[in-house]
Amino acid sequence: MDACTRCQTDISGNTFFYTVARNSYMFGFFCSRDCALESEHNRHLKGTVLRVSQPPSTHRDLVLVPDPSMLKQYNEELEKRKLREKYF
Ligand SMILES: [Zn+2]
């Protein structure tokens, strides 16, 4: 079963889904634009919400669904690196 990454609605029968794009990667399967925008994933990603006109099952290998805490950690590392580059 494919479920919305945010609200767990079953979207396996859908002919389209929403995802959050950033740096040419796609993150999460969402049932609606709002779910994608408001998701914890997007709070860290601040990406672009895309509507993909394909069933979620066809994109299982293309869409990443990381743990939100991993994204948070990644952003913190990125911030630290930016600061380091700025001052050293
Ligand atoms: Zn949803």
Image: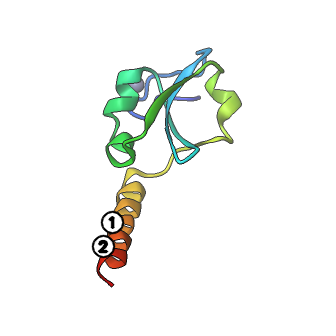
Instruction: Please tell me the numbered disc located at residue 62.
Output: none
**Badge 1 element:** helix
| Three-letter amino acid code of the residue under disc 2 | Leu
Q: Which residue is mark 2?
A: 83
| Three-letter amino acid code of the residue under disc 1 | Glu
The answer to whether residue 7 is seen in the rendering is: no
Ligand 1 visible in quadrant: top left
Q: Which residue is mark 1?
A: 79
Disc 1 to disc 2, how far (Cα)?
A: 6 Å
Q: Please give left or right for residue 21 compared with residue 32 in the image.
A: right
Say which of 62 and 5 sits in front: 62
- Queried on whether the Cβ of the residue with tag 2 lies below 8 angstroms from ligand 1, the answer reads no
* Name of the residue lying farthest toward the bottom: 88
Q: Position of residue 36 (x, y in %)?
A: 40, 30
Which residue shows up at 31% across the image and 32% down it?
A: 38
**Badge 2 element:** helix
Q: Please give left or right for residue 23 compared with residue 53 in the image.
A: left
Q: Is residue 56 above or below residue 16?
A: below
Which residue shows up at 31% across the image and 43% down it?
A: 43
Q: Are marks 1 and 2 in contact (CB under 8 Å)?
A: yes
Looking at the rendering, which quadrant does residue 14 occupy?
Answer: top right
Q: Position of residue 13 (x, y in %)?
A: 60, 16
In which quadrant is the C terminus drawn?
bottom left
Which residue shows up at 66% across the image and 21% down it?
A: 54
- Number of other residues with Cα within 10 Å of mark 1, as a class: few under 14, some 14 to 19, many 20 or more: few
- Queried on whether the Cβ of the residue with tag 1 lies below 8 angstroms from ligand 1, the answer reads no
Q: Position of residue 61 (x, y in %)?
A: 68, 42
